[in-house]
Image (spheres, rainbow, N blue to C red):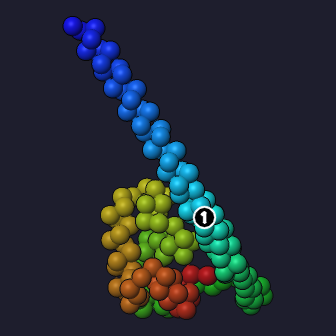
Amino acid sequence: MKKHILIYGLLGGLLIALLKLVEYRFLVVEHSIEIYGGLIALVFAGVGIWLGLKLTRPKEVVVFKEVAVSTAAPFARNEGSLRELTITRRELEILELIANGMSNREIAEKLFVSENTVKTHSSRLFDKLGAKRRTQAVQLGKELGLIP
């Protein structure tokens, strides 16, 4: 009995596979022009998109800005501004490190203090300078003669 069920199942599977093969061949033969046309359209669309992106890519523009640097006299810190703004030595040190492009974490590691201490000194410095951002504080520090 099991032998008959097994043979019946195998024959059914072979018949289904044969029907799928015939259906596939019928689909390919009957609709071959549409299939080839779709493949060609897909290739041309891909080439068109690639070429469009390649041709419309903005060109790199290199801008050189000349900055006058006076080498006649070394930098002299404006001590009057320091006293007037009551900026401490540590706050000035942090302002110099901010001007060098260091993050709060890097400043903390360099000065052997916690990151929160750096944030506290920075916020007090920003209040004294009237700055809202790090870049503004550096710009004001340079204008006031606090940092080179």
Locate residue 73: give its quadrant.
Answer: bottom right
Q: Quadrant of residue 36?
A: bottom right
Q: Point out the image quarter for the N terminus.
A: top left
Above or below, comparing residue 122 to residue 22 in the picture: below
Residue 96 appears anywhere in the view:
no
Name which residue lies at 59% across and 61% down.
33
- Residue placed most toward the observer, 78 or 68: 68
Q: Nearer the viewer, residue 66 or 41?
A: 41
SS at mark 1?
Answer: helix
User: Relative to 35, is 62 above or below?
Assistant: below
Q: Is residue 135 left or right of residue 76?
A: left
Residue at 36% x, 27% y is: 13
Query: x, y (%) of residue 124?
Result: 34, 79
Picture residue at 54% right of the left edge, 71% below the top: 101
Residue 9 in percent (x, y) is at 30, 21
Amino acid type of the residue that numbered disc 1 sits on in the rendered structure: Gly
Q: Position of residue 111 (x, y in %)?
A: 46, 60
Residue count near mark 1 (Cα–Cα under 10 Å), binned few <14, some 14–19, many ≥20: few
The residue under the point 30% across, 19% down is: 8
